[in-house]
Each structure stands twice: as C-alpha cells, then as structure tokens.
Image: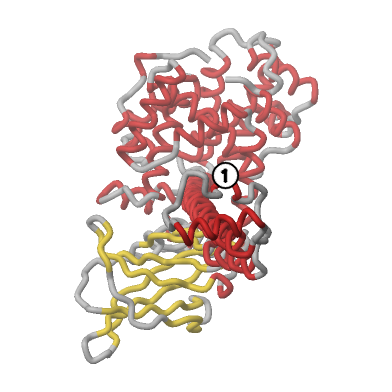
Amino acid sequence: MASKELKKHWNLSEEAFRALLAWLDGGAESDGASYLEMRRRLVAYFDRKNSSSPEDLADETLNRVARRLEEEGEIRDATPPHFCYMTARFVYLESLRSGGHRERSLEETSGASGRGLTLSAPFDADSESQQKMMGRLEDCLEKLQTGERELILEYYRGERREKIERRRELAMKLGLTLNALAIRAARIRSRLEQCVTGGADDSESTFLSHRSE
Amino acid sequence: MPSNENQIADDSLLVRYLLGELPETEAEPLDLSSVADDDFAARLSAVENDLVDAYVRGDLEGETLERFTSWFLASEPRRAKVALAAALLERERTARVADAAASRLSWKASSTRRRTWSLLAAAMLILVTSGYLLVVELRPKGPESRIAERREAAAPAVTAEEPVTQLPSPPLPLPAEEPGRVADSRAEAAPLRTISFLVAPQTRAGESVVTVSVPPGTDEVTARLQLEFDEFPQYEVVLKNPATDESLWRSGGLRPRRQGALRIVSARLPASLLKTQNYSVELAGLSSDGAPEFIGNYVFRAVLE
C-alpha cells in the first residue's frame, strides 16, 4: 500500500524527463520531437477511446513510463513505442474502472444535435473566432519551411477528382509514391495542427520550423 | 518506431476505425499500430485528414455522415481537426477568388492599355495630318510659292517636285483641346474595379460560406447567383445584413443569362456598402405583372482587405 501511495505521488523530475526523452529518441537526438509525436499519438489513442480527458491520460502514461525507466534504468522487454502503448492500454483500462471514461455523444458535449451548428461550419458562427483561426493558420504556415508549406497547400487543395489528379502530379514531381506523399503530407499537417490549436509554445514552434521530414 | 507493413489496413477499414465502428477485437491491433508504427500512424492521420476534409466540403453522405456527426464530432480534439480543415478550405477559396479577381484585373488592365495606346495613336495620326494641312495652308508664301501657284494655275496637275519634303519634320505642338481629349479617352478607358463571384443557393444550414476578398479601391462586387430553376423573365435581388435582417440594397429587374450549363442572375453591388461580415442575398422572381416571389437565399462573406 505504501508503495502504491509512493507511486501515486511520484513526480516527474527533470532528470527523469531527460531520461525519457533520450529513451524515446533511441540514441538519435530529436530535440524533443519523438516525445511530442508520442504524446500526440497517445492523446489521439485516448481520444478515439472516448476518454474524458485524453491529454491527462497521455501525460499519465508518459509519467509511468518515465517512472519505470527511473526505477529500472532501462526497459528491455519492448521497443519504446510498444512499451508506451502497453502502458497506455493499462491506463485506459484503469480509467474505465474508475469512471474516467464515458460514451460521449454530440448532444452531450456540445448541446448540438446533428449537423449544422458551429461544428460543421466553424466559420459561420463567430467572425472574431474565424479571424483568429485564420490568423493562427497563416502564422503557423509561415513557420513551415517553404517546401513543406507548398506541399501541404497543394496536397489538400481541390475537389474530389481534381484533388486526386493533383496529388498524382505532385507525387510524380517529388518522385514519391502516392502513399509516401500522403504520409509526408499527414506529418506536416499534424505539426500544423499542433501549432494552430495553440499547443505550440516557443519550443514547439522551433520544432515546427526546424524538424525535417 | 518501426513500420509494420502487415498491419497496414485498407482505407475503408481505417475510416470505420476512426468512426468508432470496429469491435474491440478488431480495433485493438489498430490501436497498437496507431501508437507504435510510424507509417501506420501517419497513414491513419492521412485517412483522418481526408475524412475531415470530405466532411467540411460536404462530401460525406448517409451512414458515414451520420456517424461522423454523432461520434466523431463528440470530441473536442477532433472538432479542432474539423476547424483546421475548414480554415484550410476557407483559405483555398479566398485564394481562388483573389486569383480570379487578379487575373480579371490584369486582363482589364492590359485591355485598357491596348485601348489607350490605340486612341493615342489615332489622336497622333489626326494631329499629324491636321498639322500638315495647317502648315501647308498657312506657310508663308515666298517667291517660290507664288511661282508654284502660277504653275498650278497654269497646270493644275501635281508634279513630282511638289512640296512633300516641306512637311514639318519636328512634331507639331498639340492644339489646346487635344490633351484634354486624350485625358478624356484615358478616363473612359479606366477600369471599373469589379470583383465577381459565383454563389450557389444555400440548400442546408451549415454549408461553407463563399468568402469574397474585396481589395481597396474596388468599385463594385458582382454577385453571380446561380439559379436552380429559371422560371421568371426577371429577378430582383435584395442584399441583407443577416444579423439584423436589414435590407441594405435592392436591385431593379435583372434578366437571367446563360453561362455554360448554368443560368445566372448578376447583381452589381456597390462595394462601398460592404464591411467585413456575412451577407445574405435574397432572390425573388418577378412575374410579368412585377409581383416578387421569393426563390432562395444566398450567403457570402465579404472580407475587406
């Protein structure tokens, strides 16, 4: 019980955090990019599980991984991403038992019913928020490297058939398969999303502008 | 984070996964890959982005749309993805409108330049010709001229020695009214700065709104309203502020015209009326006795640059 209490109140020290970053990097210095990417995936995982607080559960997962690293010095029985997932799975199951999960519906979360409110047309409702959003998007696009900015704008432009054709041409131009192009575009958009949604502080902005694909 | 090709699933399965439709036993391996497999995670993001984009463009239908609105939008992080997709779409549309306006302005400018140069050339030709006639008429008549006049009187046929070489070689000063005339020509050729956009009738709530960027100095904004059915000889357009329902401008009778496969009613709105905000445009058909019959509503957003 005492051990459990100790674990519950364990705080992530700077040293433990550095060890976690190094372990996630797997020997390659990523300047925190591996950590941010893992955290993003964990948040998405908990979000897809309809957890009530995906960000908290992602942080809890990474804290537990860091604690295990601190306690044991190393983790040999799984790769870092695999171990993070196993830990996340436990955290998720625990959250189910403690009621930290609920089936959410649109009505519950927003009071809206069906399509047509701000959810489907986020620019129709509030011009001030629209202007802010557009401003953030422009700022974040500026922080991307020129080639990345051009790629993402070109990749996601156009309607159905036009878009497919455009992507085919873009892939040929860049010498990539369509799948490789899709993956590259998705990675850039993911970073753009992190920036636009306000999660990017100065250090993440640096990551946004300097991390190469 | 290694890639596991064996676990890469097809897109339709990923869409079902993203919409929470898979049973736990099928979802669990995908959960693992979404965290532990670089390529799978990126591909899942790609499929999710395309799904969200399809939603904001109004391309989702049936059960997929139902599931998207009832399940996918129930999460704040996922709504943030929708907001980003909508912002990207808005940016794309704004850029497209700006490109179209720029190319129209560029075409008008070059067309205007051509007209101006043509008018100037014509004016110069007239001046040179009239100047020549004036000089010929008024030049001092010295002995040679008088001899020539006598020759002409004696033999009116023009000879090779007649004074073609006496044409003034330096340019003639312009008559006083000429600069004004040239300036008037320029004024006539000055382009009316017009922005034009095509808008379809709003058929359901929450559709993305066409954004019209209005550069400084724009005189008119032409709303080209796409007709679903063309049943009236003329139409009337009323520009309204949707927030107050105040009528801001009303057209006279407008005749529809054909543009490719579309039937269009064009309403030329004074740009000075517009602010950065949403506007609604009410379209009414005018029957032969002039009675208006409401047809539809069009929405656009003006953004003053």
Q: Judge whether B255 appears above or below A174 on screen.
A: below
Residue B201 position, x and y percent, is 33, 66
Residue B284 position, x and y percent, is 31, 80
> Residue A150 occupies which quadrant of the picture?
top right
**Which residue matches tag 1?**
A53
Q: Which is more toward the observer, A21 or A6?
A: A21
Query: To which chain does the residue with label 1 belong?
Result: A
Q: Is residue A170 left or right of residue B193?
A: left
Residue B198 position, x and y percent, is 38, 60
Q: Is residue B50 left or right of residue A59?
A: left
Q: Please indicate, yes or no, whether residue B84 appears anywhere in the rendered image.
A: yes
Q: Judge whether A76 appears above or below A66 on screen.
A: above
Work out which quarter of the rendered image holds the C terminus of chain B and state it: bottom right
Q: Residue at x 42, y 54 (%)?
A: B157
Q: Amino acid at mark 1?
A: Ser
Q: Under tag 1, what secondary structure?
A: loop
Q: Judge whether B202 appears above or below A109 on screen.
A: below
